[in-house]
Amino acid sequence: MIEVNGLRRRFGPVVAVDGVSFSAAKGQVLGLLGPNGAGKTTTMRMLTCYIRPDGGTASVCGHDILTDSIGVRRSLGYLAENSPAYPEMTVGGFLKFICDVRQIKGRRRKAALDRVVPMCSIDSVYHQTIETLSKGYKRRVGLAQALIHDPDVLILDEPTDGLDPNQKHEVRKLIGAMAKDKCIIISTHILEEVEAVCSRAIIVARGKVLVDSTPQELKDKHHASLDEVFRKITRSKCA
Ligand SMILES: Nc1ncnc2c1ncn2[C@@H]1O[C@H](COP(=O)(O)OP(=O)(O)OP(=O)(O)O)[C@@H](O)[C@H]1O
């Protein structure tokens, strides 16, 4: 469902993504791990057509990110860093606006809202303006807009950032439940999250893929916890 071939992107002198390649299939939850500044967000922003790569390419459900950005955007749901939204809108107003943008109308719109609002536990804040929400609720609204069109691919940048432990657990459960029918990429710093939900782990540092494996294989190979493996790999390769 996702093919990434030699993606590159620089910002002035900074090489943010330096020839990243991987593929991901339906049924997989792929965790993108890496230290701060490793290039995870930039990779996601290129995959979701928010920025263009300087080199390489990628496709999402057969749609090329360079030549068919509309096809890509239709196929995926994206939860961006910091859950961007319109602060003055109510939660309900914002989700209806997203439905309009995605041309989900009439009964389909009602069904979409009835599905995502309880799924993301945002019933109690439905009539509240987004600027009055806590960080955790803003994150859940961001998740709801990513899920509203029931896309085949989900790209979630630190999906549990700002959530309390109960909500972290709920969101991980939700990701696990959706995994069977979708291809999901999450970025995270929380290694326990990788163990809980990811069927695959890609470790990146300085814009390059260092490891592409399963969490279990990584632990078995290094005879260590995922936390220790992460530190060992990113420290030795970044030193
Ligand atoms: N718009 C931008 N302009 C200039 N530099 C940028 C821009 N976006 C990203 N960078 C730089 O590119 C590098 C990779 O950043 P990126 O946000 O992709 O990393 P990340 O792995 O997501 O980090 P974190 O875990 O801290 O969110 C960093 O050095 C960052 O400062």
Image: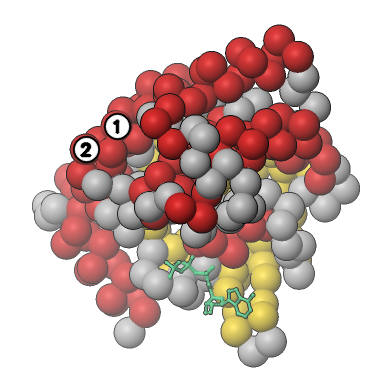
Residue 42 falls in image quadrant = bottom right
Say whether residue 236 is left or right of residue 57. Answer: left
How far across and down, in percent of the image, does residue 21 sit?
Answer: 59, 54
Q: Which residue is at 78% across, 36% downward?
A: 101
The image quadrant where one finds the C terminus is bottom left
The kind of residue on which mark 2 rests is Asn
Depth check: give the residue in front, 147 or 222.
Answer: 147
Quadrant location, ligand no. 1: bottom right
In this rendering, the answer to whether 26 lies above or below 5 is: above
How far across and down, in percent of the image, does residue 116 sit?
Answer: 51, 24
Depth check: give the residue in front, 97 or 42.
Answer: 97
Say whether residue 36 is left or right of residue 142. Answer: left
Instruction: Name the secondary structure under disc 1.
Output: helix
Residue hosting label 2: 166
CA distance for labels 1 and 2:
6 Å
Residue hosting label 1: 170
Say whether residue 93 is left or right of residue 105. Answer: left
Q: Residues within 10 Å of mark 2 (few under 14, many from 20)?
A: few
